[in-house]
Structure formats: C-alpha cells, structure tokens
Amino acid sequence: MPRTIHGLLLAVLVLPGCYDTTRPRDVTPPAEPRGLYSVTGDGKVTLPWLANTEGDVAGYRVYMGPCANGASCPYDPVATTTLTVFTVASLTNGVTSYYGVTAFDRAGNESELSLEDVRDTPRPAGVGAALRAVQDSPALSGWDFSAYRVRPWDDPRTDMYFSANGSIDEMLTADPVTIGIQDVGFASTLDAVDFAPPAGWSPTGSAARSRSAARDGS
C-alpha cells in the first residue's frame, strides 16, 4: 500500500505574455530518489540519498511520518533542499519516525516518495560509559536506557547487565519478558546499529560470546 504525501499544494502562476505556446508543458515528474538511509543522532536524524540524474531537477523535499505506509499513514513535509543530505533536528529521543524524500523539477512536477522504508529513533550517544562484570562490581554492572547511566544489576530501573561466566561474556536482560536482547554480530561502534531487527530475539533474555571470539573480532 503506498505511502501518502500530505500538506503540500503546488500552484502554477502564468503571467500574460510569458507563456510559450509553442512548447508543450512539462508534466513528467522526476524519478523517486534512491539510496535513502538514516544516521541516528542525539535529538536528530541525518538523511543522505543519491542525486537524481535528470537535468531539470530543482531540488528535494524531505517528509516525515508516524508509520511506514498505508492510506492512514500521512507523510508531512519538513524541509526543502537543493542538497542530497538533510538533518531533521529538534526531535524527541526514543520516538521512532519514518522518512522519505521526493524530487521536484523546474516545472513544479514532484516525484513519488523514495522507495526505501527508512525509520530511525534518535538517542544520545552514550559515550564514556563502561560496565563491570556483576561478579566483580555489581553496583557498576547494569545499564538504564531511559536515563543513559550505569546502575546496580538488581536496580528496578536497570534494563540489562554484564556478566563474566568463566570464559564466556554475557549480556542479560533484567526482565526477559518485557525487554528483548539480540546478538546482531560484530559492530565497531553502536552507531552501526541503527534499528532493532523484527526477529531473532533471545528467548532466554541473554546474549553471549567467548572471550577468544571477542579477541578475534567475531
């Protein structure tokens, strides 16, 4: 089901003596922009995409919506730009939104929304925090995602905590019924993990890897 663009009205103003009746009016819109993706930020989302190749493209419009698609899922315009990257700022951390981009030409024709379903949830960077193993420092082993701070493993506000079980390092959820955890593989930074996959969650509320595998980067 297609996504719906709301909140935009295009008008064409024809001035006397300025309309060339010898040339047919351009009514062909540009192609949908391609390659749209998101980069998560603190209270913001940066959206790069590939430039259109049509010679008469005048710019791009960035849209944001509350859901992926459907007739009841409006995408509202948030910006117009001539660049191929835009940062949507003043967003609320922890709230997921969906994004699309259109291209428009000098005649006012506008493309459909970009084909990619791009969603993003802004969040603080969370740098400079380190967890200790619960066996060694229980007061420094847990993490509270709502406050972005270290807490004791058994604090009711703790979402997950770190454990060293012999040669196995583990991340465990404080409540596996309401909090999901998944091993998504090796990533150099948390910025590389931009979304939660829809499947593959651990049924036990834990994810683990051997210390030898961690040294090998796997």
Image (spheres, helix red, strand yellow):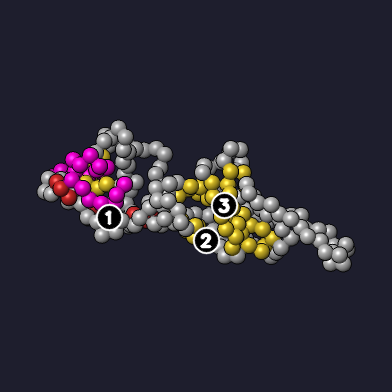
Q: Residues within 10 Å of mark 3 (few under 14, many from 20)?
A: many
- Looking at the image, can residue 78 be seen? yes
Q: Which residue is mark 3?
A: 63
Please tell me whether mark 2 sits on a helix, a strand or a loop: strand
Which residue occupies the foreground of this view, 29 or 217? 29
Q: Amino acid at mark 2?
A: Phe
Q: Which span is picked out in magenta?
A: 146-166
Answer whether labels 1 and 3 touch (C-beta < 8 Å).
Answer: no
Q: Residue at x 54, y 58 (%)?
A: 49
Q: Residue at x 52, y 61 (%)?
A: 86
- Marked residue nearer the N-terminal end (1 or 2): 2
Q: CA distance from mark 1 to mark 3?
A: 38 Å
The residue indicated by pointer 2 is 86
User: What number of labels is visible?
Assistant: 3
Report the Cα–Cα distance between label 1 and label 2.
Answer: 33 Å
**Residue 27 colored in magenta in the image:** no
* Sequence-wise first label, 3 or 2: 3
Q: Is residue 160 magenta?
A: yes
Q: Which residue is mark 1?
A: 217
Q: Position of residue 135 (x, y in %)?
A: 12, 45
Q: Residue at x 57, y 65 (%)?
A: 83
Q: Is residue 167 visible?
A: no
Image quadrant holding the N terminus, namely top right
Task: Tell me which residue sits at (49%, 57%) in the image.
Answer: 88
Left or right: where 215 falls relative to 136: right
Which residue extends farthest bottom? 17
Tell me where residue 126 sits by quadrant: bottom left
Q: Position of residue 184 (x, y in %)?
A: 34, 46
**Badge 2 density bin: few <14, some 14–19, many ≥20, Cα 10 Å:** some
Say which amino acid is labelled 1. Gly
